Image (cartoon, coloured by chain):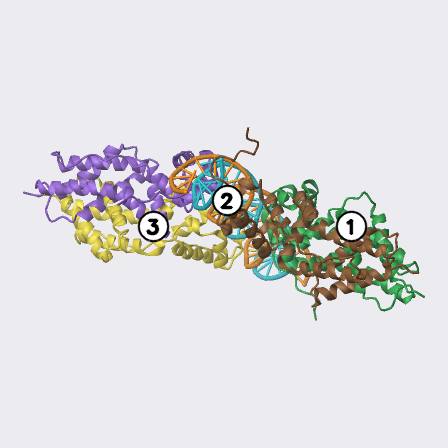
Chain colours: A brown, B green, C yellow, D purple, E orange, F cyan
DNA sequence: TTCTAAGCGAGACGGTACGTCAGGTCTTTAG
DNA sequence: CTAAAGACCTGACGTACCGTCTCGCTTAGAA
């Protein structure tokens, strides 16, 4: 008796198609800035693929872009390893601020905010933002553990402030480097997060 | 000598049409929740207006909804009149957090969509964001004048933190009231903005 | 007792507008070849006139073009004054063949044939074609009277043959002059119209 | 060695759609009498077809109706088989005069409209007029061969006279049958086309 | 002179149809 | 059974005219 799953009959799906489609979707998202401006037809054409091949894999435009964007995971720095909270946070938000200025991430931003497809936003939050947020939480918890930060902080609120600040900050073209933006945000917030004693 | 601008020739545009269109757009937006699901034809029909009358005023769907949403500005509180900075900021951001959960939020998202339409973005910045920001700046400056806040603050960064925090905070449905959200944000930031002495 | 009609009160209609509108209509008809391609707006603009000024005079596009085209009356030669039928007919159809090659007359032709507005066709027939036909009939009757032509001819059929022949002939660009076309048509027909004697 | 053209890739165009569209166009044309009163949208709807399916096949309304009408060619009689020229021509022009009173006439008018669309005019000339003309030429050549007609005739001119005569004749509603019209035209012309001897 | 009625150019109005485009599905042939 | 290609239906897009309706102004005869 053979318990290993039976191989599906017929021609197997092309893995090249998968990656080509996702790549094309992200490229076009980066070029056009918002999802409505990218047609499934354009993705298919850019990927050198038939439209049906896309619809065989995803049930619609939203799902396609959801998955495409969810593949984007910036490498984040290690935190909490002895450095100060301040330095940890600056490291993390330098990456975040940098991302936010890249054209692709702008597309992601729009996509995430687009109320047109709430489930996409939810999935992006889960797959893209949650890991990033987790790093921030780690840094904050480490800071609390070391006594650098007040123990009664609402960590979610701190996260919101920093992420939102990074987000809004990135919308004005001040000529600052991502690092400079990160330092300004983190220092401004941190000066109030430190335990007084 | 007449310096007032000469009146345009021809039949003037109907102000009733303006308001009917904007009203219809907002109604339908409220019913369908997202812009893509509302057709210009439906707006025209609901407003009892020809499509051309819409396109005479706005160059497209996006512009129409941008303006429609921009009309939804909530009145902002007076600040700097003797109350504490903390109370001023809480008052302002209670309004902001409330707005962000209402249809106006859709406008904010549209602003983001408009990365490709800089002039629309500029208009929203001017009509929606600038007045709100100005109130925040007033509160902060009053706080500095009274010695409540450090004099060396980067006000822009403080603004970014609070506005961004409010924005991100509003995206998660925690069941908190706008007032509670505002207090959390403001208190968290303020505890570090106060002059130490 | 004054029986002459009382002059209408108010500002009288501008005769310049009348002529300018008709002129513009004919010009544009000549340029665009068929009525559907000429908009009332274009006529108004070309005439330097408001649209209402047109609609005050004619109840619609059809009536406007009807009247415009009805003003076209080519000067026709005198016939039946002693010359031969053949020469009379050649003279008339030289004019007709010439007209049919002018751009404007092509517009008229289209207009007349346009089944979209039967009443226009009827009026053009009456005001433009009937006088021309009458001259042909005169020539034919003179020929019969002089014994040049058979007395039992169906004059309408002869007219149809010649007019239709001129019409169809003018549609092929053979490089022939109007006179040559006319002679070919008339001679071919006449050789059978002559009394045998 | 395969000389037959390779089959085009993708789904082939539906022949049912072709015929349904053409049928619907002619039906509506019959109901509304003139082209301007028939909308492409109505044709699509009647044919049970999307508008795009129409525009994929024809570049516009005019082209669609041109082709629709061009399908209405009546079968022409055999000529030159022993009968007299007169009878041959009467047979042919009975068909022609009949057609000119039917919906086909609308096609003729469209041809005229197409002064601005030379390729459509060319198509109608090729598909509708050329075959008919060829039959007339055959009859005339047979007549010459048999000595019934003068050998020095300009056949093109004879054709123009008869065709044009039929056309103009059909525009007045005299209550005559197509056959009567044809006889009048042919007899009038023939009496001069016969060799004298 | 002043009043009144209509005409004037300009252009906005509610509609209808145009021709285009994209979404998501279906139908070919080829592998 | 999958692949690429491309036709299919649907429905919204933004445009162009139609014939009508205001605007503020001009033109003339009547008061």
Residue at image location 50% in from the left, 55% down from the top: C44
Q: Residue furthest left?
A: D197
Q: What residue does disc 1 label?
A: B169
Q: Chain of mark 2?
A: A
Q: Are marks 2 and 3 in contact (CB under 8 Å)?
A: no
Q: CA distance from mark 2 to mark 3?
A: 46 Å
Q: What residue does disc 3 label?
A: D119
User: Circle 1 — which element?
Assistant: helix
Q: CA distance from mark 1 to mark 2?
A: 42 Å
Q: Residue furthest right?
A: B197
Q: Residue furthest bottom?
A: B1
Q: Chain of mark 3?
A: D
Give coordinates of residue C159: x percent, y percent.
24, 44
Residue at image location 83% in from the left, 45% down from the top: B177
Q: Is residue C121 left or right of residue A162?
A: left
**Mark 1 Cα-neighbour bin, 10 Å: few <14, some 14–19, many ≥20:** many
Residue C8 visible to the viewer? no
**Mark 2 Cα-neighbour bin, 10 Å: few <14, some 14–19, many ≥20:** few
Give coordinates of residue B126: x percent, y percent.
72, 60
Give coordinates of residue A182: x percent, y percent.
75, 63
Quarter of the picture holding the C terminus of chain B: bottom right
Who is closer to the viewer here, B38 or A129? A129
Q: Is residue D37 above or below residue C97?
A: above
Q: Chain of mark 1?
A: B
Could you say which quadrant of the image residue B27 lies in? top right
Q: What residue does disc 2 label?
A: A14
User: Circle 2 — which element?
Assistant: loop
């Amino acid at each position: 008796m053979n318990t290993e799953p039976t191989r599906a009959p017929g021609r197997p799906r092309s893995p090249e198609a998968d990656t080509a489609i996702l790549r094309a979707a992200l490229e076009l998202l980066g070029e056009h800035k918002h999802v409505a401006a990218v047609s499934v037809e354009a993705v298919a054409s850019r990927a050198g693929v038939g439209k049906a091949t896309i619809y065989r894999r995803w049930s619609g435009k939203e799902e396609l872009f959801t998955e495409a964007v969810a593949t984007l995971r910036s490498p984040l720095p290690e935190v909490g390893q002895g450095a100060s909270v301040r330095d940890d946070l600056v490291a993390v938000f330098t990456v975040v601020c940098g991302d936010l200025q890249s054209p692709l991430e702008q597309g992601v931003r729009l996509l995430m905010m687009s109320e047109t497809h709430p489930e996409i936003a939810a999935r992006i939050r889960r797959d893209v933002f949650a890991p990033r947020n987790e790093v921030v939480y780690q840094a904050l918890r480490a800071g609390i553990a070391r006594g650098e930060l007040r123990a009664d902080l609402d960590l979610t609120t701190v996260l919101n402030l920093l992420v939102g600040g990074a987000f809004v900050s990135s919308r004005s073209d001040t000529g600052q480097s991502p690092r400079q933006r990160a330092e300004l945000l983190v220092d401004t917030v941190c000066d109030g997060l430190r335990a007084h004693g």
